[in-house]
Image: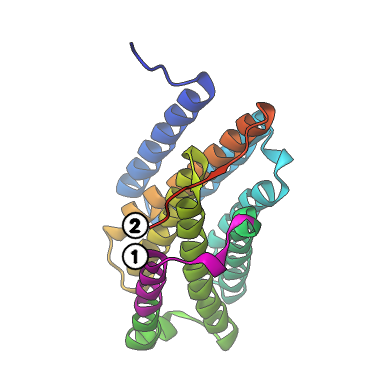
Amino acid sequence: MKTILPKKYRNLLYLSIFLILINLLVIYFYDLQVSRYVRLASTTIVLVYSLFYKGYKFKFLFVALLAFLIKDIFVLDYEDPFSKTMSFVFGNFAYILVVLLVLLKVKFKKSTPIILVFVLTLVILNVVNVFYLSDIIVQKLDNTTQYVLFMLQSVLLILLGLVGFSYNERYVGKTPLLFLYLVMSIIMCDLAGLAAYFFEFQVAFYFERIFYLLSLILLLNFSINRETQISNNLVLKEKEFIL
């Protein structure tokens, strides 16, 4: 018996493949500015696409997509100090909204050893990022405000990882797994962006764009999946055994 992917998920798969291929080709054949415009267009397409599947019903999710879109507008002129600052502001705002999507469903008081190890690993990586690489990072920033926002972004990434992993460890099903994939894509996108912009590692631009688009698609996928659950009166079940 063949398993056929439902149309709405199949269309989302086609959209993700299309956007990723277009973006990679543009990065390869055109300059950085053209790539930024295509990134903005891709985010716009995902935002508009979400309207067809009632993405607006989940306010945090829809506003998060909108925040990513506004961030991309400021990224068009990223070398300008004000634009760079605002890109940090809206990026961090989007991360906060993603955390709020499931924060109330996570029970930190029941954290397990594997979750603690995961969080400790993220903290160590962040400490290395802040102190070992700080001299290089500061050279690419324009003012203290940007540095503070960069540090806040690092903290939010740790929180995203903690919430995503805890959510997936607590509940059974596709929805928590999708959220975990979402936060991991965001984290990988940030790391690739760090390598691409701050360390001028050109290949990293491809990975940054792939993980960025995957983040948007997974956010939309999460929205569609939650809408399906609500429509069918389904509730998340807690795992009987937690690692």
Q: Which disc, if any, is residue 205?
A: 2
In the foreground, 87 or 30 = 87
- Identify which amino acid the numbered label 2 is placed on: Phe
In the foreground, 188 or 228 = 228
Residue 206 against residue 232 in the figure, above or below: below
Q: Which disc, if any, is residue 196?
A: 1
Secondary element type, mark 1: helix
Q: Position of residue 41 (x, y in %)?
A: 54, 43
At 64% from the left edge and 30% from the top edge, which residue is drawn?
53
At 66% from the left edge and 28% from the top edge, which residue is drawn?
52
At 41% from the left edge and 16% from the top edge, which residue is drawn?
4
Q: Is residue 38 visible in the rendered structure shown here?
A: no
Q: Earlier in the sequence, mark 1 or mark 2?
A: 1
In the foreground, 56 or 71 = 56
Secondary element type, mark 2: helix
Q: Is residue 142 left or right of residue 47?
A: left
Q: Which residues are magenta?
A: 105-125
Residue 117 against residue 184 in the figure, above or below: below
Residue 116 against residue 43 in the figure, above or below: below
Q: Position of residue 220 (x, y in %)?
A: 56, 40
